[in-house]
Image: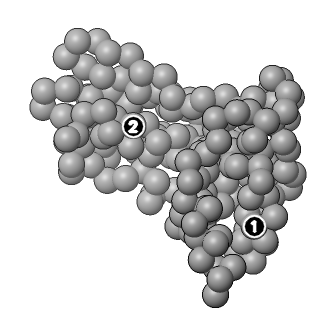
Amino acid sequence: MLIHRLLNRFKRQEPPKKRDDLGILVFANTSEVIQAERVLKKGGWPVRVMGPPPGIQSGCDLVIEFPLMEELHLQRLLTDAGIPPLEVVPVNDPLLKPVDLFHTKDFGGYLMVRAANMKLTVDKESLVIVNVSGGGCPDVPWLAGLMVGQTLMDTPSPGTMGHTLCGYALKLALEEVERQCLP
């Protein structure tokens, strides 16, 4: 019981700011990253999904940044969930720094957020999604058709409709637009 309380005390802290204190979890595919993020965030762990550093990039993939001193706890949790990482890499070299997924562009009346390879643009006054673009996954036109013309409050979440990198990136873009536009 005491160990459980101590773990809960530490796992809800913000990620450390120094790069030497961070690590990245590498997985076989985007679907595993999405599942791992869900498991870790549900447990209250301070993790972030990032783009992989160029030195370990292997295609259409993402990594999870985490506090390095929690490595054993997180690996055990993910192994128990059936999604162990392929590799755990300490971020102690500038070339191993994960890539931020978000870029925001304010066009006055419109706000565009790019998350990885997907862009979502919203009318800032009406909060209507006016454009979805980017990516190369086969579900992008279908997701765009569901979302364009909908308000931020009414649009379906692309994260619940698939496991492609594009769908996941669009979910992240939607969350960032909501964070910036909704009270």
Residue 145 image position (x, y, % from top left): 33, 41
User: Which SS class for mark 1?
Assistant: helix
The answer to which image quadrant residue 92 occupies is top right
Answer few, some or many: residues within 10 Å of disc 1's Cα (few below 14, many 20 plus, some between 14 and 19). few
Give yes or no for contact between labels 2 and 1 (Cβ–Cβ under 8 Å): no
157 relative to 74 in the view: left or right: left
Residue 163 image position (x, y, % from top left): 57, 55
Taking the view exactly as shown, the residue that stands out farthest to the top is: 108
Q: If the image is split into quadrants, where does the C terminus sit?
A: top left
Residue under label 1: 73
Q: Relative to 156, say whether 5 is above or below.
A: below
User: Which SS class for mark 2?
Assistant: helix
Number of numbered discs visible in the structure rendering: 2
The answer to which image quadrant residue 78 occupies is bottom right
Query: Nearer the N terminus, badge 2 or badge 1?
Result: 1
Taking the view exactly as shown, the residue that stands out farthest to the left is: 126
On the question of residue 56 being in view, the answer is: yes
Q: CA–CA distance between discs 2 and 1?
A: 29 Å
Q: Relative to 133, say whether 107 is above or below.
A: above
Q: Residue at x 61, y 50 (%)?
A: 47
- Choose between 43 and 11: the one closer to the eye: 11
Residue 174 image position (x, y, % from top left): 38, 40
On the question of residue 83 being in view, the answer is: no
Q: Residue at x 32, y 15 (%)?
A: 106
Q: Residue at x 55, y 59 (%)?
A: 12
Q: Residue at x 75, y 67 (%)?
A: 73
- Choose between 73 and 61: the one closer to the eye: 73
Task: Indicate which disc residue 176 carries.
Answer: 2
Q: Amino acid at mark 2?
A: Glu
Residue 76 image position (x, y, % from top left): 78, 71
